[in-house]
Amino acid sequence: AQSVTQPDIHITVSEGASLELRCNYSYGATPYLFWYVQSPGQGLQLLLKYFSGDTLVQGIKGFEAEFKRSQSSFNLRKPSVHWSDAAEYFCAVGALANRDDKIIFGKGTRLHILP
Amino acid sequence: AAGVIQSPRHLIKEKRETATLKCYPIPRHDTVYWYQQGPGQDPQFLISFYEKMQSDKGSIPDRFSAQQFSDYHSELNMSSLELGDSALYFCASSSSGTRTYEQYFGPGTRLTVT
């Protein structure tokens, strides 16, 4: 079955520290992978996406993610977090090769930033 | 660039009332998707439409119905509202004329049922 696993429900890091949010997926077809960020009560903002090509993807706000097919992972990283990065982060997967291909979201990781 | 428009952005209804959410896709996008995100939950796919026909269906209650119109906008109709219907409802759109059906999300409509 298609699924996305974000093993960490909550993560707390100090401002200025590095960050890595984990994401593993299970998908029968070649997946397209996404990371979205959501502030409380707000909509989904796309941070970055992987469709093909270079497995290290650069996104907005200084985020990057690396697709590792052998590990079925698409971890999100940032070298130095800012207090404004505190939010909920969703990893998502979808084949998007057909119009019936829906996007499947992970349960999310809530990021807390210590001053 | 034009984005997906959803209206209203916020809606408060009482139990057993009816609500209608509207979605206006990006120009030239012909496919619309609806997702529901409950409090503290991840977004879940509800239903999708292509060229005014239902394309796929997820975990959408029978009390909900949706349609896509000739101008490609879509409406999600929710009847006999329950407290558990309180959620953020996202609409996304995609174009069949591109290499992938990449979905672009709207800002969401927050529905509160009291």
Image (tube, rainbow, N blue to C red):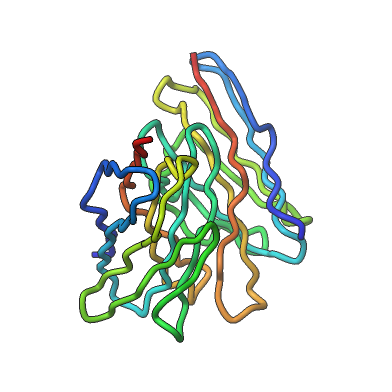
Viewer-proximal residue among B36 and A25:
A25
Q: Where B55 falls versus A98 (above or below)?
A: above
Q: Where B100 falls versus A63 (above or below)?
A: below
Is B15 situated left or right of B70 in this image?
left
Q: Where A69 falls versus B107 (above or below)?
A: below
- Tell me residue B73's x, y (percent): 72, 51
Viewer-proximal residue among A48 and B84:
A48
- Count of picture labels: 0
- Tell me residue A102's x, y (percent): 44, 61
Viewer-proximal residue among A69 and A112:
A112
Q: Where A71 falls versus B25 (above or below)?
A: below
Could you tell me which quadrant the N terminus of chain B lies in? Answer: bottom right
Is B81 situated left or right of A107 in this image?
right
Task: Kindly give the residue lying farthest to the bottom in the view shown.
Answer: A53
Is A19 situated left or right of B68 in this image?
left
- Tell me residue A110's x, y (percent): 34, 41
Q: Residue at x 45, y 28 (%)?
A: B85
Q: Residue at x 46, y 54 (%)?
A: A36
- Tell me residue A6's x, y (percent): 26, 54
Is A87 situated left or right of A67 in this image?
right
Q: Residue at x 57, y 17 (%)?
A: B13
